[in-house]
Image: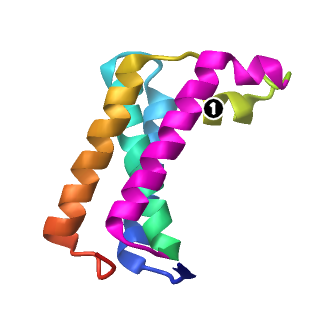
Amino acid sequence: MTVKLNLKFLALTLVILVTEIAIAYYLKSGFVRYTVGDFLASILVYCALLSVLNIKSITAAIWALSLSFSIEFAQLIGLLDILNIKHIKIASILLGSHFSIADLLAYTLGIITIYFIDITYIKNENN
């Protein structure tokens, strides 16, 4: 694994990040805010990894899904409360506040979607 800037994935990362910020800012509830937001969050992590690391797509998919699941399970155990950081807004935004099996499904579907888009259309050179 080496550090290598990939402009295609950097551009995707920035577009998805702006989309996620817009969803969070303009939508306060509903399917798009929660489910589509989580779907895109896992894709964001995948693209961010491939924008700076020279790794295989499958490796990025496993790492991104693992990180997404880890954050969700941190919610299950109440990590924000354990660390006494629930009052810190950025921690609450990044780590979330409640566990949901639907979130795990959204993360999984996001990773499956971006992985197959990557290997079929983007053709990441590291596959």
Name the residue that disc number 1 marks.
95
Give percent across and percent down for residue 113: 22, 48
Q: Is residue 111 magenta?
A: no
Badge 1: how crowded within 10 Å, few (<14), some, or many (20+)?
Answer: many
> What residue occupies the far left of the structure in this picture?
120
Quarter of the image for the C terminus: give it.
bottom left
Please state the extent of the stretch shown in magenta in the rendering: 54-83
Report whether residue 116 is seen: yes
Give me the residue at 45% from left, 42% from top: 20
From the viewer's perspective, tell me whether residue 75 is left or right of residue 31: right
On the picture, is 112 further left or further right than 90?
Answer: left
**Could you say which quadrant of the image residue 88 lies in?**
top right
Nearer the observer, 104 or 34: 104
Q: Name the main secondary structure of what is drawn in magenta.
A: helix
Residue 74, relative to residue 48: is it above or below?
A: above
The image quadrant that residue 119 belongs to is: bottom left
Determine the secondary structure under disc 1.
helix
Residue 97 appears anywhere in the view: no
- Residue 53: percent from left, percent from top: 51, 74
Q: Position of residue 65 (x, y in %)?
A: 43, 45
Q: Nearer the viewer, residue 80 or 7?
A: 80
At x 44%, y 42%, the residue is: 41
Is residue 96 depicted above or below 70 in this figure? above
- Give the residue drawn at x 39%, y 69%: 9
**Does residue 65 show up magenta in the picture?**
yes
Q: Residue drawn 40% across and 34% down?
A: 37
Q: Is residue 54 above or below residue 81?
A: below
**Which amino acid lies under the numbered mark 1 shown in the image of this protein?**
Leu
Vertical position of residue 32 compared to residue 16: above or below: above
Residue 40 lies, in percent from the top left, at: 37, 42
